[in-house]
Image (cartoon, coloured by chain):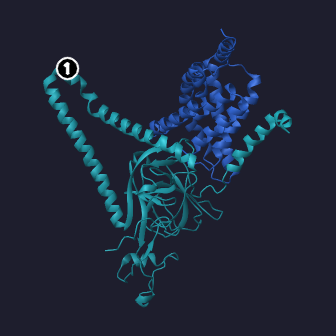
């Protein structure tokens, strides 16, 4: 029973993690220098959902994460929502072409997504007829963010793996749980 | 029917996942917005955490600056250091209070100078993305804050309120790409719109190439939008690029407000426009009257023609009972 409850709490827990992450991100990295080192925690969660969640559940979670990011930004309404969704769909559709074997692969994927996310943002701004930032300047600002993003990705993805394992959401743990329920059903 | 839904489940979901964000896009990028009910629920969780983290961080920095540097001295004289540390802590605390006092005094002076009705707020967080320059303050609806209200500091214009929740408000700073403040050059009365550019500078757009704008010129708010009171400093012209052709000139503006050190701000809940009747002896009038933008009444005009003081509910009807009375 406890395991089923833990499994049910996985998704709300992930939303709570996103809320906590964004609260920490926006207040810890609010200093004049620190803000350049601001990683994108929401992006990491979106990538995680794209690769480790079923299509429906991952998509809904991505919309929730996009909305959480949006209410912490002055960006035009809907912008983060659509960018998060594009990252989700992009990573998901590209997932058949790569295999993630270790932490460095996670880091690399996270960095590529961060760059594409920013490029997409500038492109969307130009489509919305909003002022587009100076690309050279913004690209330079992206460098420290890439550094901190790789550090966060290095630790966050294994942590999320553990989180899924402890809440019986990872495929292996899920199978164990199902086997156990099956045995219980047979009176063992 | 259900069989079809199951069969095309993926495509239906894909369609919905693309439709929802696209329909959520608001093309009116500069319009103030409201939080939805679920946004407010998320904010109710996030805002206290942000405030606690900010307080802890500020405390830690203060602790590091006031205590840790003295750690080695303790080895030399434990007893003396105990006393010293206690005193230093008191001094640091007093100095912090003094500095805060000075900042608040300056804010008060600014408020009195421009006859503003304001609410003081503290900056608790910044934008989640480096591409935008929004800040979050710890005052919201419960203090009468509404979208589109002006936000200032003792140095000048900070920005305008984008949206509010019960306890917090998001402010689009003048450095944000989506900010636009109608401004005039104090010296030559040349007009333009100040828009955000980078983390340090903004740009004055739509300033005519023939306008007299020079580096060092002070830009002030024109008061035309109704959001900002007239005459509040916006920034100083840092660079002018006037080409030999074209209609406008490129003007870079360094904001009056140091955003890297911004801690407290004033939210203008209402302000009073007090038209002054200039006299001929006033040298400023002679200078200003050369500009076409100047609208001062003629010295011989009957006094009744001058518009009476107008209380501007900034910009939406304020919850405060009455505008500030002018002394």
Residue at (61%, 43%) from the top-left corner? A67
Letter of the chain that mark 1 sits on in the rendering:
B
- Residue A57 picture location, percent across and down: 68, 32
Q: For mark 1, what is the residue?
A: B75
Q: Position of residue B139 (x, y in %)?
A: 42, 52
In the picture provided, is A116 more to the left or to the right than B326?
A: right
Q: Residue at x 18, y 33 (%)?
A: B86
Note whether B74 is above or below B51 in the view shown: above
Q: Is residue B180 left or right of residue A125?
A: left
Q: Assign a secondary structure to mark 1.
A: helix
Q: Which chain is blue?
A: A
Answer above or below: position of B271 versus B106: below
The residue positioned 59% from the left and 35% from the top of the image is A42
Q: Which chain is cyan?
A: B
Q: Is residue B54 above or below residue A50?
A: below
User: In this view of the protein, can residue B248 be seen by the observer?
Assistant: yes
Q: How many marks?
A: 1
In the image, taking residue A113 as reference, residue A24 lies left or right, namely left
């Amino acid at each position: 029973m406890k395991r089923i409850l833990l499994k049910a709490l996985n998704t709300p827990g992930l939303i709570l993690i996103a809320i906590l992450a964004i609260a920490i991100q926006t207040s810890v990295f609010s200093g004049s220098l620190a803000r350049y080192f601001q990683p994108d925690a929401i992006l990491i969660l979106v990538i995680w959902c794209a690769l480790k969640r079923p299509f429906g559940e991952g998509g809904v979670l991505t919309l929730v994460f996009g909305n959480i990011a949006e209410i912490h930004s002055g960006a035009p309404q809907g912008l983060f929502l659509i960018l998060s969704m594009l990252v989700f769909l992009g990573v998901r559709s590209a997932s058949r072409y790569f295999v993630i074997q270790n932490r460095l692969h996670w880091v690399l994927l996270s960095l590529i997504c961060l760059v594409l996310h920013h490029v997409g943002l500038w492109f969307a701004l130009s489509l919305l007829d909003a002022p587009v930032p100076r690309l050279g300047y913004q690209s330079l600002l992206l460098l420290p963010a890439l550094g901190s993003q790789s550090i966060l990705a290095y630790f966050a993805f294994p942590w999320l793996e553990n989180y899924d394992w402890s809440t019986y959401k990872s495929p292996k743990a899920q199978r164990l749980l199902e086997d156990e329920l099956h045995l219980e059903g047979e009176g063992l | 029917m259900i069989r079809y839904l199951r069969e095309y489940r993926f495509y239906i979901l894909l369609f919905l996942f693309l439709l929802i964000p696209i329909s959520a896009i608001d093309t009116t990028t500069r319009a103030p917005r409201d939080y939805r009910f679920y946004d407010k629920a998320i904010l109710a969780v996030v805002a206290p955490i942000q405030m606690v983290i900010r307080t802890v961080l500020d405390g830690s920095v203060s602790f590091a600056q006031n205590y840790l540097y003295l750690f080695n001295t303790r080895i030399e004289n434990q007893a003396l250091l105990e006393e010293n540390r206690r005193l230093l802590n008191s001094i640091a605390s007093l100095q912090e209070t003094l500095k805060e006092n000075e900042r608040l005094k300056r804010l008060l002076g600014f408020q009195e100078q421009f006859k503003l009705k304001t609410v003081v707020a503290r900056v608790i967080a910044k934008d989640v993305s480096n591409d935008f320059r929004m800040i979050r303050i710890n005052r919201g609806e419960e203090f009468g804050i509404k979208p589109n209200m002006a936000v200032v500091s003792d140095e000048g214009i900070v920005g305008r309120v984008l949206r509010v929740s019960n306890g917090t408000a998001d402010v689009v700073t003048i450095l944000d790409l989506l900010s636009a403040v109608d401004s005039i050059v104090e010296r030559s009365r040349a007009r333009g719109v100040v828009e955000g550019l980078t983390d340090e500078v903004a740009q004055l757009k739509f300033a005519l190439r023939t306008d007299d704008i020079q580096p060092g010129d002070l830009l002030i708010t024109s008061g035309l939008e109704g959001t900002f009171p007239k005459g509040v400093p916006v920034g100083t012209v840092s660079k002018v690029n006037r080409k030999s052709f074209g209609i406008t000139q490129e003007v870079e503006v360094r904001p009056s407000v140091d955003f890297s050190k911004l801690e407290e701000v004033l939210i203008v809940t209402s302000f009073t426009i007090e038209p002054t009747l200039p006299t001929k002896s006033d040298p400023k009038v002679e200078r200003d009257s050369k500009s076409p933008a100047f609208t001062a009444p003629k010295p011989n005009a009957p006094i009744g023609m001058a518009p009476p003081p107008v209380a501007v509910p900034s910009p939406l009807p304020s919850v405060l009972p009455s505008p500030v009375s002018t002394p």
